[in-house]
């Protein structure tokens, strides 16, 4: 994946002589360069390992916390980042911990047990009913999903259809993008198991709310198609287009 990123940079970035190095630091045998590739572009951190006078590419990072020195003390205010970057960071941290736990449980208890650990449907449904009290239970679940994923999690969500028997949501989760862009996750877990965790979570949440869920993928977009299983309390229809 790093090679793919570098190929994209080579195709779209200006010539290296136009890159602007913002900072440079050597840590032992490690060289770190922070640079912009074009005016007003994001910062890129390139890390190289030096061995016997030869440079070896080690890491590419596109998120930098703007702290380059210790601020005057005592300090109680620290620089912020855009919401999109913070959402990515939160998801990467939480996902990495979940994968570590899944890997341990799979080794000790088996794959089925490891997947079952992440089923949180009952609690998720309680939150939906409690925080959207004026809707029917099924409406509350779908609309809470959309709100929670977009507002709390920073994912792009499109609610395409919602009525008393069916719902359709297009979700572009950071979780799916992470596997393709964060190299350490691919070293920890197979894509099959990675997506199985994601699907186990959402199918259990749908089950708890009285929905059957079919999931499919269009690139990094997850198409979630819900079909009602239980009695319906309301007939309100939400539909786009």
Image (cartoon, helix red, strand yellow):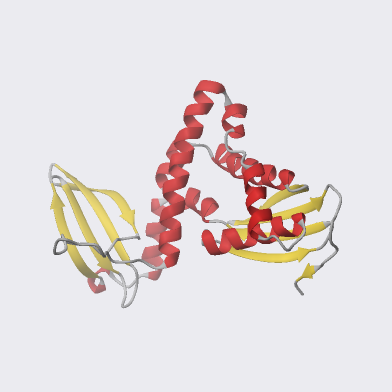
Q: Is residue 108 above or below residue 1?
A: above
**Which residue, as the protein is rendered here, is positioned at the far top?**
108
Q: Residue at x 76, y 65 (%)?
A: 161
Q: Position of residue 102 (x, y in %)?
A: 51, 33
Seen in the image, is 126 located left or right of residue 4?
A: right
Mark count: 0
| Residue for point 72% across, 44% down | 208
Residue 7 horizontal side relative to residue 57, left or right = right
Residue 43 point in image, percent of width and height? 30, 66
Figure quadrant of the C terminus: bottom right
In this view, the residue in front, 131 or 47, is 131
Based on the displayed image, in which of its 4 quarters is residue 166 positioned? bottom right
Q: Is residue 40 above or below residue 66?
A: below
**Residue 64 at x, y percent in the picture:** 30, 61
Name the residue rendered at 75%, 55% in the picture: 137
Q: Tell whether 59 sits left or right of 107.
A: left
Task: Kindly give the residue lying farthest to the bottom in the view shown.
Answer: 39
* Foreground of the two, 20 or 7: 20
């Amino acid at each position: 994946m790093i090679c793919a990123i570098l190929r994209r940079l080579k195709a779209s970035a200006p010539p290296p002589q136009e890159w602007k190095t913002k900072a440079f630091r050597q840590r032992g045998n490690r060289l770190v360069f922070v640079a912009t590739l074009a005016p007003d572009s994001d910062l890129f951190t390139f890390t190289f390992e030096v061995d016997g006078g030869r440079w070896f590419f080690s890491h590419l990072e596109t998120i930098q916390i703007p702290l380059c020195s210790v601020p005057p003390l005592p300090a109680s205010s620290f620089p912020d980042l855009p919401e999109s970057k913070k959402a990515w960071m939160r998801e990467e941290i939480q996902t990495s911990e979940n994968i570590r736990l899944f890997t341990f449980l799979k080794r000790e208890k088996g794959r089925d047990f490891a997947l079952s650990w992440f089923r949180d449907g009952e609690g998720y449904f309680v939150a939906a009913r409690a925080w959207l009290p004026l809707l029917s239970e099924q409406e509350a679940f779908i609309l809470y999903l959309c709100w929670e994923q977009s507002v709390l999690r920073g994912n792009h969500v499109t609610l395409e259809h919602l009525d008393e028997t069916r719902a359709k949501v297009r979700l572009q989760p950071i979780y799916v993008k992470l596997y393709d862009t964060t190299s350490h996750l691919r070293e920890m877990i197979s894509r099959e198991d990675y997506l199985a965790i994601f699907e186990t979570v959402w199918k259990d949440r749908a089950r708890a709310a009285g929905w059957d869920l079919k999931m499919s993928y269009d690139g990094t977009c997850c198409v979630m198609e819900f079909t009602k299983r239980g009695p319906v309390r309301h007939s309100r229809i939400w539909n786009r287009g």
